[in-house]
Image (cartoon, grey):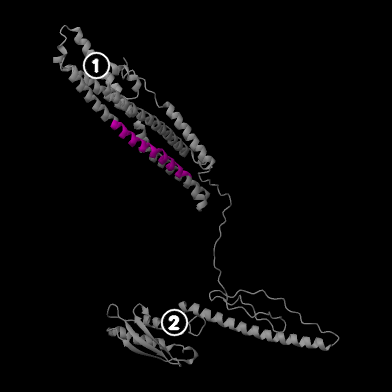
Amino acid sequence: MGMLASTGLVVKLVLLLLLYFSVVSWGIIFYKLLQVYRANGASERFLEFFWKAKRFDAINSQLDRFEHSPLTVLFQEGYGELRKLQEKVEEKADPNSVSTDLGGVDNIARALRRATTIEITRLEKYLTFLATTGATAPFVGLFGTVWGIMTAFEKIGQSGSASLAVVAPGIAEALIATAIGLVAAIPAVMGYNHFQHKIKVLISEMDSFSTEFLNIVQRNFAGR
Amino acid sequence: MKTAFTRNYPGPGGMLAISLVCHLVVFLVIVNWHFLPEFHQDETPVTYVDMVTLPVASPQSGMPAPPAPAETKAPAAPAPAPPAPAKPAMALPTKPAAKTPPAKPKAQTEAQQKEAEDKAFNERMAKMQQKAEERRQAAVLDALKKRGSSRTGMPGATGNQAGSDYSSYLQSRLRDALKQVIATQTKAPQVIATITVSPDGSIDYRVEKGSGDPFFDDAVQRAVALAGKTLVPPPNHTQYKRVFRFMPEGVK
């Protein structure tokens, strides 16, 4: 404690900044762990339920059970667009007009793409902070160390003694900044890489689900 | 029907609070368990000391003077071994002088006998101590000779003084003489010659291997002759003989 208290103002500010980086990084890591864990679990259960169910409206009524899955968002968007198309068809006299209009499937595909993009954005939210922390925290710590060593040398010059007992404490105090910078950066980089991989897996799941949904729509609705 | 755009996702606020608590716990653990090294400013004043080597007037100045045989009670143990060659002998604490037994008014036989025995004992011990002292002085002198061999051969030296040997002395004389008469024609000439100094101080030399440079060979011959003019005879009236290598850089 005394070692931290004896550092200069600039080094203290650097340490506070690094503490902020570390606190927020770990907060994001905890948040993303929970988010990705829930999303994976809910997606698995939703897919199982999706392939067992016979009707879209039955699936739509049970979506609250899979609240954290991004696939439910895709299903909602696709099903919502399908319903709009059906309502439009029902308004017209000829009920077979949808079967010859391929633009209806394109509308659903666009809705699914948009929902996928929104879910990717939601999943990747706050990850940029982890990347920023991983990239900049060591340099911020290095800046604190350089500043601390400059101050330490200045004090050594004023004291007029170059013994190890005078030189070592100042340098050790300055090196704390680099150590804390690394402590903040290492988990951030590890977390960023881990979540990037997990989100990539979820994106591929969403793409697969979109394709399957469009196939089902085209198979069951476009031929009427 | 719910859409993705109306779904309300929880933010990371709760996790940030958990993270803050974790950091506080880690900080308190580090502080309380003294994981960080503590440095205390050294407040003791700095003292500067100049290290100087004072010249010694005489290397034997620290030696104890030989005690007077009659006045000093000799120690029971013999004199200590000679000191290390590099150091002059340390002054030994002088023993308090033994008081001679006062003459008693009554001349008793036993007292006289005891006095005679003491006197004889003192004389014996004084002789032993004197011998030990001579041995020690000889050892110190020998050590000084050995020590001085690396820097002997100074101009003006005779080779018989303490701290020098005749080989270095002769080498120095030859080197000085060669510097005065040197002349070369080739790049790195070298003459190997056996120098013989007779007990009366006359010098003789025989070339073992010439340099091939007539100028340098002649210079070596003249240097030996020049050095022989002021040469001191070898110690103990013996003949001195050694092989020297003459080069423009010096004599080895």
Residue B56 percent location from the top left of the image = 56, 73
Q: Is mark 2 on a helix, strand or loop?
A: helix
Is residue A179 covered in magenta?
yes
- The mark lying in front, picked from 2 and 1, is 1
Classed neighbour count for the residue bearing mark 2: other residues with Cα under 10 Å, few (<14), some (14–19), many (≥20): some
- Judging depth in this view, the residue of B144 and A119 nearest the camera is A119
Is residue B146 placed above or below A185 in the rendered structure? below
The rendered magenta stretch, by its main secondary structure, is classed as helix
Is residue A199 covered in magenta?
yes
Is residue A167 placed above or below B220 in the rendered structure? above
The numbered disc on residue A81 is 1
Image quadrant occupied by the N terminus of chain B:
top left
Classed neighbour count for the residue bearing mark 1: other residues with Cα under 10 Å, few (<14), some (14–19), many (≥20): many
Is residue A8 placed above or below B180 in the rendered structure? above
Residue at screen point 39% across, 38% down: A187
The numbered disc on residue B240 is none
Q: Return the residue found at the far left.
A: A100
Image quadrant occupied by the C terminus of chain B:
bottom left
* Residue A160 in sight from this viewpoint: no
Q: Distance between the residues labelled 2 and 1?
A: 113 Å
Q: Is mark 1 on a helix, strand or loop?
A: helix
State which quadrant residue A46 falls in: top left
Write down the residue under mark 2. B168
Q: How many marks?
A: 2
Please state the chain letter of the residue tagged with numbered disc 1 in the rendered image.
Answer: A
* Residue A36 in sight from this viewpoint: yes
- Judging depth in this view, the residue of B193 and A26 nearest the camera is A26
Residue type at numbered disc 2: Ser
Magenta range is: A173-201
Residue type at numbered disc 1: Glu
